[in-house]
Amino acid sequence: MNQFRLTSLIPLIAMAALAGITWWLLQATLPRKTDDEVRPKEHTPDYFADNFSVSELDQSGATQYRLTAQSLVHYEDDEVSDLVKPAMRAFQPGKPIVTATGDTGTVNADASIVNLYQNARIVRAPGGGDPQMQADSEHFRVLVNDDVIETEKPVKLQRGMSVMTASGMKYNNVTRFMQLFGNVRGAIAASDSGS
């Protein structure tokens, strides 16, 4: 009787083996995934830089903007770079240098938008009869192509002896015009010439 069971299982074992070999052959003949396939980009770093500096020149070859940072980490999906200790400096002939800094920051792919976070500060050097101006906030957005710096966060502004606070700010470095938004308070000194 055991002999009968064994001989009746042989066709079943053969069919299972044939099915297994068929599956293996199918897998072996399927086209392989290639590197040419477009894969979705992930939010992973694809390059790094330490103690870097990049400058944008005007048509005459003079430095117009300079972005520096202790470190940069670039991400492949959105092409945004994270910055540590960034500093953005604007140079315009005949105008005071404007420097914007932060503890951390980001810059987009074409370097047209630089965000500065944590202890963010803007300093416009004295010049042209104006005293030094300094603005402090937790966030500043530098719109490089427009030469505008703005924030939607509370800001403290010091210009010479005058001190102002506001809920937000927009500064145009070309026109040197500043707008303060929201709850604006301050004390304007009689003379800002003592800087």
Image (cartoon, helix red, strand yellow):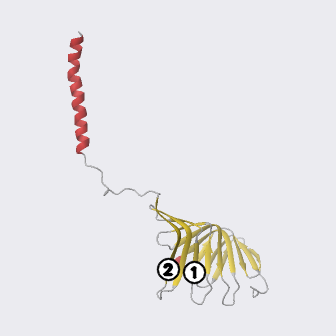
Furthest-front residue in view? 51
- Residue 85 location, x and y as percent? 60, 68
Q: Secondary structure at mark 2?
A: strand
First reached walking from the N terminus: tag 2 or tag 1: 2
**In which quarter of the view is residue 117 placed?**
bottom right
- What label does residue 12 carry, if any? none
2 and 1 marks in contact (CB < 8 Å): no
Q: Quadrant of residue 143?
A: bottom right
Q: How many angstroms separate mark 2 from mark 1 (CA)?
A: 10 Å
Q: Nearer the viewer, residue 88 or 181?
A: 88
| Rendered residue at 32%/56% (across/down) | 35
Image coordinates for residue 100, horizontal then vertical, percent = 61, 75
Residue shown at 23% from the left, 34% from the top: 21
Q: Residues within 10 Å of mark 2 (few under 14, many from 20)?
A: some
Tell whether 70 sits left or right of 164: left
The kind of residue tagged 1 is Ala
Crowding near pointer 1: few (<14 within 10 Å), some, many (20+)?
A: many
Residue 28 sits above or below residue 86 on the image: above
Residue on which disc 2 sits: 56
Circle 1 — which element? strand
Residue ID for mark 1: 90
Q: Position of residue 42 (x, y in %)?
A: 44, 56
Residue under the point 72% across and 73% down: 165
Q: Residue at x 23, y 19 (%)?
A: 9
Q: Give the quadrant of the C terminus.
A: bottom right
Instruction: Identify the amino acid type marked 2.
Output: Glu
Residue 191 x %, y %:
77, 87
- Residues 134 and 183: in front is 134
Residue 194 vertical position relative to residue 170 in the rendered view, above or below:
below
